[in-house]
């Protein structure tokens, strides 16, 4: 645990597969028991920073005859193991935070199983609640900690007597600020409950949906405010903040999908 907390050991999550995204329980990656190891074959996709990770925790199918949710096991794999290959996926934003991960006869010790064999779905669901809370916080209540929306407005819009002349933009900004504050207060209540020992519940999914939609609204509004300055991709004529805004907006299109739909 200490190396993880210190950021000295990086982990990635092997959940989604090319044919198993929203219907994650249909995953096909197999793990077959051989002595005191499982031999794993399959493919994961959208694995965040798999090319940089030291370890992966992943879901594998250990009992293909069981009901799909009941034949899954949660296991840990060393990313330096023979048979592990990662390929970064380039996004429309130009960044490559996600990877395809290929597993060919990868061996993982039975001691690396978390909880019980064929009970991995229970572990995965619990972790997803925490992940969705994190996504909601990152893209919703704590998003946009740099230059404020009002700063963008002062820089790019007509201001008369301290007021934005475009009434429709003023209304959109006010609505966003009210919704953002309400969402932040709601997630703060949930964090206080977590500190008191209550595990995340179904509200995590609601937070994730609303928080990511809120982030998309924020970036779409910033693009409207920036106008032609938000059309840049590279080269002269655009500031770094303008180029970052364009790429952040493109990246935000995936917010509502990642972490489970």
Image (spheres, rainbow, N blue to C red):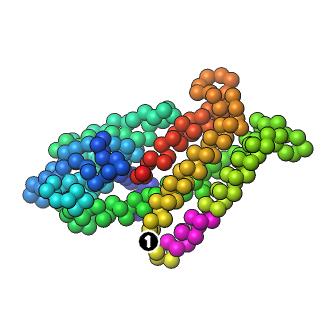
Residue closer to the observer: 39 or 161: 161
- Residue 151 seen in render: no
Side (left or right) of 166 relative to 33: right
Q: Residue at x 32, y 51 (%)?
A: 23
Please provide percent x and percent y for residue 257: 44, 47
| SS category of the residue bearing label 1 | loop
Side (left or right) of 259 relative to 81: right
> Can you name the residue that lies furthest to the left here?
35
Quarter location, residue 7? bottom left
Residue closer to the observer: 126 or 57: 126
Which residue bears the numbered disc 1? 199
Please provide percent x and percent y for residue 32: 13, 53
**Principal secondary structure, stretch drawn in magenta:** helix
- Residue 196 seen in render: yes
> Can you name the residue that lies furthest to the top here?
236
Query: Which residues make up the magenta segment?
Result: 184-194
Please provide percent x and percent y for residue 162: 87, 45
On-image quarter of the N terminus? bottom left
Q: Residue at x 29, y 43 (%)?
A: 19
> Can you name the residue that lies furthest to the front here?
168
């Amino acid at each position: 645990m200490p190396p993880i907390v210190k950021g000295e050991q990086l982990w990635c999550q092997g959940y989604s597969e090319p044919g198993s995204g929203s219907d994650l329980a249909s995953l096909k990656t197999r793990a077959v028991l051989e002595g005191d190891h499982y031999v794993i074959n399959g493919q994961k996709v959208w694995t965040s920073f798999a090319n940089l990770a030291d370890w992966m925790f992943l879901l594998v199918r250990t009992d293909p005859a069981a009901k799909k949710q009941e034949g899954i096991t949660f296991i840990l794999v060393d990313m330096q193991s023979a048979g592990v290959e990662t390929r970064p996926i380039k996004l429309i934003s130009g960044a490559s935070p996600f990877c395809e991960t290929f597993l060919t006869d990868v061996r993982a010790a039975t001691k690396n199983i978390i909880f019980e064999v064929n009970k991995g779905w229970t572990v995965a669901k619990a972790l997803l609640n925490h992940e969705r809370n994190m996504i909601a916080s990152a893209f919703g209540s704590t998003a946009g900690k740099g230059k404020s929306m009002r700063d963008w407005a002062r820089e790019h819009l007509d201001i008369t007597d301290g007021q934005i002349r475009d009434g429709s933009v003023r209304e959109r900004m006010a609505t966003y600020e009210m919704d953002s504050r309400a969402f932040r207060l709601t997630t703060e209540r949930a964090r206080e409950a977590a500190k008191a020992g209550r595990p995340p519940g179904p509200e995590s999914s609601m937070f994730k949906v609303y928080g990511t939609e809120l982030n998309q609204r924020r970036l779409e509004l910033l693009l409207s405010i920036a106008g032609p300055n938000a059309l840049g991709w590279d080269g002269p004529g655009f500031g770094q903040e303008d180029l970052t805004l364009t790429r952040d907006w493109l990246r935000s299109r995936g917010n509502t999908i990642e972490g489970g739909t």
